[in-house]
Structures are given as structure tokens and as C-alpha cells.
Amino acid sequence: MFFVLVVDTESTSRSDLVTALHAHGYQTFVADNIDSALKPLKYLAIDAIIMAYELPDVSALELLSNIQNINSSHARKTIVMCPDNNVNSRITSLQHGADDALSKPIDFNELIIRLSKLLKRKNIYNLTTSDTIEFNGIEMDIQSLKVFIDGQQAPLSLTEFRLLYYFARNPNKVFLRSELGRITNGVNNKIDQRSIDVYIMRLRKSLQKYGKDSLIQTVRGVGYRFSA
């Protein structure tokens, strides 16, 4: 499962791209300006960023520069959507660190193919060739969204899977409830903290059946930590 940040001021274009990404199994976060784009990059494990060249008051070049300045061990691939047949903007984007650049109107099939190739070259998260994560007797199959605990399949909801996936990829990190809200429901569709507590309670209950509920620890007044 890969997480893609879409940065575009045009709501229709942004919505169409998100729909295309979802259809191919990607999880998405959305932003319509540079400030809202930088927030998730500071604390979420975003795999790729697809951005419009023209953003409010800035260009994708400034966003590319900011991305490079964020102190993160998590490599992110970047694709810039440039104005119609503007060769200079494509060249400039590549010169400023973009991994790929396409001209509008965007053919989503081509974009998905290019994105897929970029992510295959990343070799991130130490996933096996079958795209699984294994820890403490728990195996997560990223492609099928299935979880096996001590050899038994654990019936987790999609929200529980997302939470466990992020916890597993960030062991011993303290997550604020606000962060978990964005993880489970997207950057621009926040959910309240009480709902997060309910989701965590459900995940713990699911793990309790296999004696794994103690992996999720409450950090009083802050949020939650996962000890993998």
C-alpha cells in the first residue's frame, strides 16, 4: 500500500486524480496550497507527491525545495503536472529535483504507469518481494490487506489495518491523536479525537484475542505509541 499526496488548486482535476489513484489501490492525501502540503510531509510517511506546477503565490519549484529541506529518512518520489505543452516548465521541474514531469491535460493511465515505475524503484520500508511486513508474530499482506497473527487470519477493518500499518512502520514513535486522525481519514477530512480513541480501542480488542494488545500503549495526555 502506497500513500500519495496530491497537491493541486483545481478541485475537479484534484478529485479526478484521486479517483484514478484509488482505483489502482493507492491511498491519498490532498492539499491545495504549499502550506497544507508541507504539514503532512513533516509527520506522515508519504511515498509520492503529485503536484501542479502552478500553486497559489508559488510554483512547484518552491515546494520541491521545501521537500528537500525537510529532515526525513523517508524518500519520496515527486511528479509535477506542468502547463499545456510547456517544455520549459518540465525541464525546470526536473532540474529542481522532480523525479518526473508531465504536461496537462494529464492522461491518468500514463501518470499511474509512471508513478508505479517510480515506486517500484524505491525499495522502501524493507518490504519483501510479496509486500509483507512481519513483526512480533504478526504478518501484514499489503496487497490483499490481510493480517495474520501467529498463523491465524485476523479480521481487521480497513481503518484498523491502516492504524496497524502506520504503527508497524513507525515503532516507538508517539502519535498525536490529530496525526492518527489524518492517517485514518485524510488530511482535509479530520475526525475528532474521541473517534480515534474508539478506533484504537477496536484495534486493541482485535489484537487482544491473540495476546498482542499490549503492543499499543497509551501516552497520557498525548496519544499512542506502538512497541513492535
Image (cartoon, helix red, strand yellow):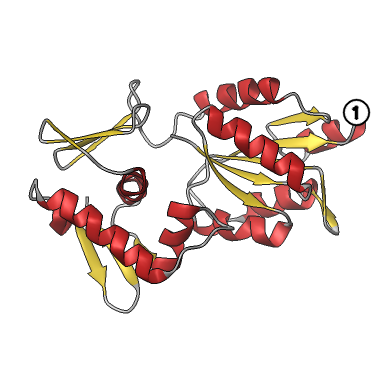
Q: Position of residue 19 (x, y in %)?
A: 61, 35
Q: Is residue 200 above or below residue 136?
A: below
Q: Is residue 66 above or below residue 134?
A: below
Q: At 75% from the left edge and 43% from the top edge, which residue is drawn?
A: 12
Task: Name the residue carrying label 1.
Answer: 87
Given residues 178 and 171, the one toward you in this image is 178
Residue 78 seen in the current view:
no
The quarter of the displayed image where residue 14 is located: top right
Q: Position of residue 121 (x, y in %)?
A: 52, 24
Q: At 55% from the left edge and 29% from the top edge, which residue is drawn?
A: 23
Given residues 227 and 181, the one toward you in this image is 181
The quarter of the displayed image where residue 97 is located: top right
Mark 1 is surrounded, within 10 Å at the Cα level, by few (under 14), some (14 to 19) or many (20 or more) other residues, namely some
Secondary structure at numbered mark 1: helix
Q: Position of residue 224 (x, y in %)?
A: 30, 65
Given residues 127 and 176, the one toward you in this image is 176
